[in-house]
Amino acid sequence: MKRKIVRGGKVFILIYCTIGIALYYLQEKFIFHPVKLSSDYLFSFSSPFQELNIPINKTDTVSLIKFFPTTVVRKGVVLYFHGNKENILHYTKFVNSFTKNGYEVWMPDYPGFGKSTGEISEQKLYEQAYQIKRLADNSYHPDSIIIYGKSFGTGIASYLASNTMAKELILETPYSSIPDLFSCYAFMYPTSYMSIYKLPVVDYLKDVPFPITIFHGTADGVIPYRCAASLKKSLKSNDRFISIEGGSHNDLSRYDVYKKSLDSLLR
């Protein structure tokens, strides 16, 4: 009996360590699901747009699409940091929510996504977001700039908002931090030590001096609601955490509470 227990313990430790090692070395594969585009790919959208390829250094470029409203008078610009899937093409269906309200939308791709080049890292994501914000500052006053993050992009948006000035920070389906999100799936591992990427949204929000609005669905199966609800403790008294009953990870734009609340913010 004792031998069986010892043998079972050894098997458990072996499995535990094997999974842990795989999680550590393959975590970028779990986090990022990019789709690259060739440099000569021709974008085509129903709304007016401009394509920019911004050189960062000898190896890195940022592919940025500017979407324009059809109205003559433009209220400002939304810096839109998208999720961890595919590239800009996957997220253009959300652009109309902003352009119909008179806002430009500037949407960059991360390194290795779409036409953007270079190796991805947390520091690069921060630095490139800051470069885009500096470009926006050349055209718009901070009171006309909205920083928007969706899913993975909420970490980048929160960092940027904590280090600059803008009108509003809007987060759609955020997480508290990457280690905390990992712990929702692999609670038996020391995720705070294992995670290469941190993106501590919960900490960044404490340093954002302007209004914050958060949208999260109660039925989100990708970033569980409980992993976002902890952000409430980082919000100011005039910030808003809007729970969308029954909303999942990719369908919040279908709900009236999201539509009406976003339109109100943009008006």
Image: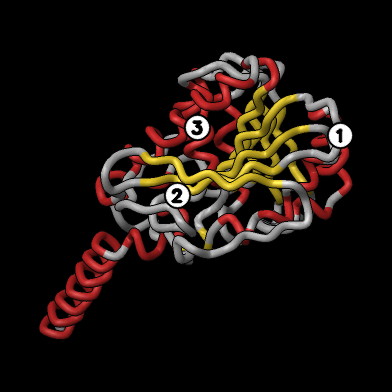
Tag nearer the camera, 3 or 1 = 1
The quadrant holding residue 43 is bottom right
Seen at 68% across and 60% down, the residue is: 44
Seen at 26% across and 59% down, the residue is: 24
- Relative side of 34 to 91, left or right: left
* Residue that mark 2 sits on: 110
Q: Is residue 173 visible?
A: yes
Q: Pinpoint residue 260: horizontal percent, then vertical percent.
A: 88, 38
First in sequence: mark 3 or mark 1?
Answer: 1
Q: Are marks 3 and 1 in contact (CB under 8 Å)?
A: no
- Relative side of 186 to 267, left or right: left
Q: Is residue 202 visible?
A: no
Q: How many marks?
A: 3
The quadrant holding residue 258 is top right
* Residue that mark 1 sits on: 71
User: What type is the residue that disc 3 sits on?
Assistant: Ile
Give me the C-alpha separation between circle 1 and circle 2: 29 Å
Query: Circle 1 sits in a helix, a strand or a loop, which is it?
Result: loop
- Relative side of 223 to 252, left or right: left
- Asked whether 122 or 40 is in front, the reply is 40
Q: Pinpoint residue 227: horizontal percent, then vertical percent.
A: 54, 46
Q: Pinpoint residue 123: horizontal percent, then vertical percent.
A: 32, 37
Q: Is residue 169 above or below residue 53?
A: above
Q: Is residue 134 above or below residue 177?
A: above
Q: Are marks 3 and 2 in contact (CB under 8 Å)?
A: no
* Residue that mark 3 sits on: 132
User: What type is the residue that disc 1 sits on?
Assistant: Thr
